[in-house]
Image (cartoon, rainbow, N blue to C red):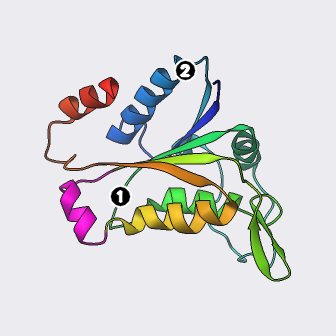
């Protein structure tokens, strides 16, 4: 079945391991069932990642953020690719999410209870870590995944189908990991 897939690269460096992973997924997914695949590289977007007044006064969205919202609405499946830095997602990704996950777009409150407005969409989370994968599994590195999966996406009605962690990227053989990803 054909899907509209949006890959969101949460790393600021277009030559990073995560960028290469996003490129591999982009090429692979285009070939399956004639999927339509788009990619957002956060490092190229022009926007202020700071939510200056919280949600009491919504900031005007920059054109790049309006386009990102349109791409999210278009997508059936979202793939987030980012590194875990200091046991969390990069600030650029967090700022992006702070700015676009807005009431009226991604959720609304009915009788004081939140209701996701992006239901029917699925997601996949792909992260890289400098240390061994097991270190992040046991010592809290999954916080960076849980925040996105259980707090942000679930709140908006998006169901996460898959999570992948590629560990040991700083000291390991990146090329063998990338070859493995190509064959998955």
Residue at which label 1 appears: 84
**Residue nearer the viewer, 18 or 154:** 154
Residue 170, image x, y percentages: 19, 48
| Residue drawn at (31%, 31%) of the image | 181
**Residue 130 sits inside the magenta stretch:** yes
Whether residue 161 is situated above or below residue 85 in the rendered picture: above
Residue 183, image x, y percentages: 31, 24
**Residue 134 sits inside the magenta stretch:** yes
**Residue nearer the viewer, 168 or 134:** 134
| Residue drawn at (60%, 37%) of the image | 6
Which residues are drawn in magenta? 128-140
The secondary structure type at the circle numbered 2 is helix
User: Going by the picture, which residue comes out furthest to the front?
Assistant: 1
Q: From the viewer's perspective, is the residue at label 2 or at label 1 nearer?
A: 2
Residue at which label 2 appears: 30
Residue 81, image x, y percentages: 45, 45
């Amino acid at each position: 079945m054909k899907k509209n897939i949006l890959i969101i690269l949460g790393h600021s460096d277009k030559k990073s391991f995560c960028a290469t992973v996003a490129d591999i997924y982009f090429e692979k997914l285009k070939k399956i069932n004639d999927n339509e695949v788009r990619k957002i590289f956060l490092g190229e977007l022009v926007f202020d990642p700071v939510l200056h007044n919280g949600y009491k006064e919504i900031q005007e969205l920059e054109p790049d953020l309006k386009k990102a919202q349109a791409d999210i609405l278009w997508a059936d499946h979202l793939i987030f690719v980012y590194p875990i830095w200091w046991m969390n997602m990069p600030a650029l990704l967090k700022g992006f999410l702070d700015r676009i996950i807005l009431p009226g777009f991604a959720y609304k409150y009915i009788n004081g209870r939140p209701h996701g407005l992006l239901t029917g969409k699925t997601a996949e989370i792909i992260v890289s870590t400098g240390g061994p994968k097991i270190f992040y599994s046991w010592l809290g590195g999954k916080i960076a995944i849980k925040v996105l999966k259980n707090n942000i996406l679930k709140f908006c009605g998006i169901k996460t189908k898959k999570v992948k962690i590629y560990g040991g990227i700083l000291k390991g053989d990146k090329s063998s990991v990338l070859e493995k990803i190509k064959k998955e």
